[in-house]
Image: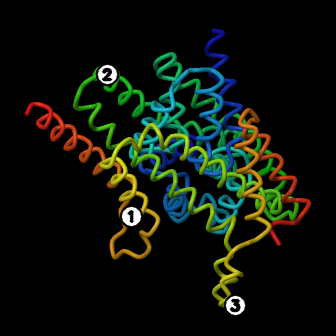
Amino acid sequence: MIYLQLYFEFIKVGLFSVGGGLATLPFLYDISQRTGWFTQADVANMIAVGESTPGPIGVNMATYAGYMTGGIPGGIITTLGLITPAVIIITIIAKILNHFLGNRYVEAVFTGLRPASIALIASAGISVMKVALMDIPGWKTSGKLSDLVIWPALILAAAIFAGQKKWPKIHPTVWILIAAVIGIVFRFAE
Amino acid sequence: MQEYLDLFLTFAKIGAVTFGGGYAMLPILSRELVDQRGWVTDQELTDYFAIGQCTPGIIALNVATFVGHKRKRLPGGIVCSMGVVFVPLIVITIIAAFLRNFAEYPVVKNAFAGIRVCVCVLVVNSVLRLWKKSVVDIPTLCIFLAVFLLSVFSFLLPVSFSPVVLVLLSGAAGLLLGQVRQKGGRK
């Protein structure tokens, strides 16, 4: 019975969390409060694990929450719950779009959507930059502008950027792997 | 059957190398789906992200479903979504079972501090790549700047605009623009 409940709770999460994976957070806190399946501290741990493992953060957190509640089947069921609304809604939209393919009005709408879409992606990129390349708390305590930038991170970023330009054929995953190794060797988290 | 397996494995691979939210998936999607397989175009990918960001559900799953639907309708959409979650499901289950303090290990923290730097660069490069096909004239540049500034500096504003609102307004702006252009064309 818990599995059915888990499934429906995560259909709700999938249905109402619009935007990035972290949009699922308020729902996870809500579930924790209402059901007591996992604690608020567990949710904090889910974010940490979700961000430091492969896969979209939202999916990772759902799997983790499901496992905490119902073991391996629980993890599978919450993930399926999360997928269900996405598949249904997007299938409907895709069908409608196919129907209107080449329609002048739909084309016009997409002319407006495309720059907005990449602007949102760029702004998500900026949020990652704030964490990865900048030390905002450090800058606030010292007040020195040179403390705002995490220099080794900036150098690595510039190197990857130049590398991608020079060798565009190299798969993005290779760069991720190189960055992980450099992060470990030079202790980037400290 | 072969094609379903192909869809599943491709998205399983993409799910395994995505670090962060759905936006982090974009560089990998461009490479795997546009460059290597030719399943979708850059423009379609941008469209999917636009819709994926303003419809319910995790962006990554929405985009995967779109691509799957384009290839093989509903079954394709299901197979691709299953593919995206496949590796994370296994990894997270193992971590939740045995390594609850996984995120606290210094080696993990250091590796991810490095990975985050890389993800920034990959995302910037993706944006630059899609820029050429999305920002084609002054009006589209204005839409880009408006949405970008409103979402980056949302913390300075008394009201914050959700991505949903921004995407809907941009769609409306596009529609309006199309109408104005058509009228101009008639004269």
Q: Which quadrant, please, contains the C terminus of chain B?
A: top left
Residue B13 lies, in percent from the top left, at: 71, 31
Residue at the right extreme of this rendering: A185
Spatial distance from mark 1 to mark 3, Cα to Cα? 29 Å
Q: Are marks 1 and 3 on the same chain?
A: no
Amino acid type assigned to the residue bearing label 3 in the image = Ser
Residue at 57 percent of width and 56 percent of height: A125
Please state the chain letter of the residue tagged with numbered disc 1 in the rendered image: B
Q: From the image, tell me which residue sits under label 1.
A: B150
Residue B49 lies, in percent from the top left, at: 47, 40
Residue at the front extreme of this rendering: B187
Spatial distance from mark 2 to mark 3, Cα to Cα? 56 Å
Instruction: Say what secondary structure mark 1 lies in.
Output: helix
Amino acid type assigned to the residue bearing label 2 in the image = Leu
Rendered image coloring scheme: rainbow
> Around disc 1, counting alpha carbons within 10 Å, would you say few (fewer than 14), some (14 to 19), or many (20 or more)?
many
Spatial distance from mark 1 to mark 2, Cα to Cα? 31 Å
Q: From the image, tell me which residue sits under label 3.
A: A142
Q: Locate residue B61: give its quadrant.
A: top right
Amino acid type assigned to the residue bearing label 1 in the image = Leu
Foreground of the two, B126 or A184: B126
Residue A122 lies, in percent from the top left, at: 52, 54
